[in-house]
Image (cartoon, grey):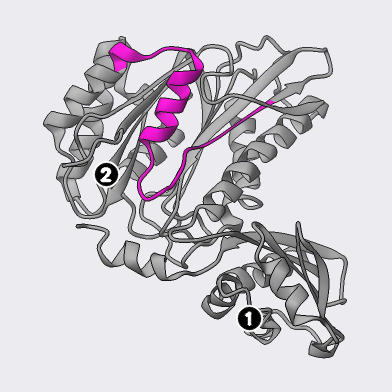
Amino acid sequence: MIKKIEGGVTTPKGYKAAGLRAGIKAGKTNKDMAIIVSEVPAVFGGTFTKNIVKAAPVLWGKKIVEEQEKVRAVIVNSGVANACTGEEGMKNVEMTAKEVADILCFQKEEVLVGSTGVIGAQLPMDIIKKGVKMLCDSVKDDRQSAIDAAEAILTTDTHKKEVAVEMTFSDGTKATIAGMCKGSGMIHPNMGTMLGFVVSDVAITKELIQKALKEDVEETYNMVSVDGDTSTNDTVFVLANGLAGNILIDEENDDYKVFCKALHEVNEELAKNIAGDGEGCTKLFEVQAYGLETKEEAKIMSKSVITSSLTKAAVYGKDANWGRILCAMGYSGVEFDPQKVDIILESEYGTIQIVKDGIATDYSEEEATKILCANPVICKVDVHKGDQMATAWGCDLTYDYVKINADYRS
């Protein structure tokens, strides 16, 4: 059994967190550094951006995932991405990890690092070191500490993003998985400027947690797009410290399926939160593609619609411009018969079919506009050539997106 519960990264057993302002973001008062610490070593998995240009913390994280069996902490800063920073950037990542390890008495290779913010700037290491000390002195396992950590990793996000889920295994043991993330702009399939940190008290092997994460990312974070830009810093880490006391999951049995389902619920919720908080957006735009021959075709088609600038602008304008949707389907690269396409719009205000067999229905523009006024808006497209479907998440495209990104470094 799986159920959503109130909580954040301190909800699973054995995790402490902190978030605070160290002073990285000059002239601002918001928090800019966070830490998560496991009381005992935790197995972990990680996935990263597919951008050839990878930030220093991504390169550090990939190395740790490949070489280390367990970790103890994740340290994150916002404001400076530490991307395109050369050898100095790599030294600064290692120095940050060492600062944490020295204070908390474990090895620097047990510390994962995340950064987000402006590309090309070096980390202000005097501020980082001070922030690390303050964080390590502040870690607690209470709810507020999780909230502080979730707030400290934000950049242009408008709100924190957290979720927690409780699962019950075959022997009756209850375990918890919880996560926090950030992401608002430079978001595109293959992971955007997004950082995701998921922690659990489940007992599971590193091999299986990595397998579960890698597979689920394809159905969640990689189905999100805000603006078509794939970042240099995308990272998702999942930790599991085993303190729930369940029988170790070391094979793909029923308990593994329960864990995967709970992980998916957490990741999907975080992914939708990212899409729904896209820079300048007013609503989450969800596209469900049906009737494809393969899962991959369905993914390609749903992504094509959510990444269409014209479609995103129409959603913002509350304009049921179905021609833009059909056009995006047509250039997706997926073969289909345009004369067999159905398109439906749906929200809390109702459901309306605007296209049947490739041509417009006699729908009410007034009703369609009302449906598009809601948040979220769901678009269902069906090409009737198979039994596979996929869902992608994006947002509308507004004037504010340009305003935010025209002066991001200011």
Q: Secondary structure at mark 1?
A: helix
Q: Which residue is mark 2?
A: 79
Stretch in magenta: 136-165
* Quadrant in which residue 253 is drawn: top right
Q: Secondary structure at mark 2?
A: strand
Using the image as rendered, state which of residue 84 and residue 129 is in the foreground.
129
Residue 291 seen in render:
no
Task: Report if residue 211 lies within the magenta region.
Answer: no
**Residue type highlighted by circle 2:** Gly
Q: Which residue is mark 1?
A: 328
In x, y percent, where is residue 57?
A: 32, 41
**Residue type highlighted by circle 1:** Ala
User: Which residue does the image show at 70% across and 82% down from the upper left?
Assistant: 322
Tell me if residue 88 comes above or below residue 338 in the rendering. above
- Mark 1 or mark 2: whose residue is earlier in sequence: 2
Q: Quadrant of the N terminus?
A: top right
In x, y percent, where is residue 358?
A: 81, 88
Circle on res. 1: none
In x, y percent, where is residue 380?
A: 77, 68
How far apart marks 1 and 2 lie (CA) works out to: 35 Å
* Quadrant in which residue 95 is drawn: top left
Local crowd size for mark 1, using a 10 Å CA cut-off: few (<14), some (14–19), many (≥20): many
Task: Report if residue 149 lies within the magenta region.
Answer: yes
User: Which residue does the image show at 43% across and 58% down from the upper left?
Assistant: 279
